[in-house]
Image (cartoon, helix red, strand yellow):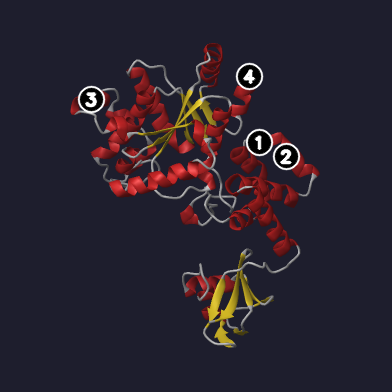
Amino acid sequence: MLDVDQQLHWLMQGTEDVVSPSLLRDKLEKSQQTGVPLRIKLGVDPTAPDIHLGHTVVLEKLRQFQELGHDVIFLVGDMTGRIGDPTDRASTRKQLSAEDVKEFSQSYVEQARKILDSDRLILHYNSEWLEPMRLTDIIRLMAQITVARILERDDFHNRLTEHVPIYLHELLYPLMQAYDSVALRADVELGGTDQRFNIMTARQIQEAFGLPPEVGMFLPILEGTDGVRRMGKSLGNYVGINEPAPEMFGKIMSIPDILITRWAVLLLGEDAEKWNYRLEAENPRDVKADLAHRITTRFWGQQSADASLEQFNRTFREHQVPDDMPMVELPDDPWHVSAIELVARLPEIPSKQQARRMLQQGAVTVDGSKIGMTDTVEVRNGSWVRVGRRHYYRFRTK
């Protein structure tokens, strides 16, 4: 059993901010003295069905609390999700249907269980207490905070300045989210740095209802594979946790070396000094391969991670063509075709515009030879094409 100082050091590792470390220490000491575990809350609004590695930063911190014996509450905001979190929004978020919320909620929970110990996970939906609320309950809640306080958040302030409409239901969001902490009697709440306003509001509302305020623990936003922008599907720099193991492994191997230690700390809960030392003492490529192997193992198991490492080595280090490639049918054998039409026919290339961009970047080879925009190529049964660094396809006759 770790003492309080050791627990505090481990839990603070990789955080952007904690409000406040002294309060967290007090709660840990009380938990150790009484034997009563802390109640750790993470609220997730099911606004999309897929989780990428950026979302798992906070899940990793939850797992650490689990390993210390505390109660982790995974709260699905099925009710607040229907309002829509206005955080980082320049306009009103589209309200989700009840059917979408149900589908996305199930997907979130299934994916979260890949990281958290599902046997020790406490699952709640905030519709359990928000849906039965009467108007008198809502009025009492609204009386605990001023309009000026709500409008302090940058999202609302910017929209007011730019004369973008703000609807009343959006003002309710931080209050509903804050009441979740009252209903759950949360000791600690985790969230990204973009959730500061919501979590600080929860602390205020807890005190208004006669409860001790929770500790706010803020985790950094993970940079994507480009090493610059926050990870996001719309930016194309994400690694989805449901992506096939070889794809996950390959994407992680594409990150810049400067992100290796940061990803190890945020995604694996590792000590930064250890990884910095490794980067000085070892080839960064090998350190990155270990990072990719360990992350892939977490989601797909040892066997799949080993196979992904072997395939990566065979393809990129030994310059061999992978055995297992998606098949693309040939309209003729041999097929004489322009480079643009050839690439546009491949899976995951949605348009000739993207095909043209890949060719302009020199990212396409056929049977080992690079092709350009104006080339006409001949492909036969068994020919293969590589697009970018990781995507291979083989042609076959019908």
**Which residue lies under the disc numbered 3?**
137
Of pointers 3 and 2, the one earlier in the residue sequence: 3
Answer above or below: position of 137 versus 271.
above
Q: Amino acid at mark 3?
A: Asp
Q: Amino acid at mark 4?
A: Asp
Element at label 1: loop
Q: Amino acid at mark 1?
A: Glu
Q: Residue 257 location, x and y as percent?
A: 68, 49
Evaluate if marks 2 and 4 touch, with contact meaning CB atoms under 8 Å apart. no
Evaluate if marks 3 and 2 touch, with contact meaning CB atoms under 8 Å apart. no
Of pointers 1 and 2, the one earlier in the residue sequence: 1
Indicate which disc residue 276 carries.
Answer: 2
Element at label 4: helix
Evaluate if marks 1 and 2 touch, with contact meaning CB atoms under 8 Å apart. no
Of pointers 2 and 4, the one earlier in the residue sequence: 4
Of pointers 4 and 1, the one earlier in the residue sequence: 4
Circle 2 packing at 10 Å, graded few (<14), some (14-19), many (20+), is some
For marks 3 and 2, give the CA distance. 52 Å
The part of the image, by quadrant, that contains residue 138 is top left
Q: Nearer the viewer, mark 2 or mark 4?
A: 4
In the image, farthest residue toward the front: 119
For marks 2 and 4, give the CA distance. 23 Å
Of pointers 3 and 1, the one earlier in the residue sequence: 3
Give me the residue at 36% from left, 23% from top: 182
Answer above or below: position of 284 versus 36.
below
**Which residue lies under the disc numbered 4?**
5
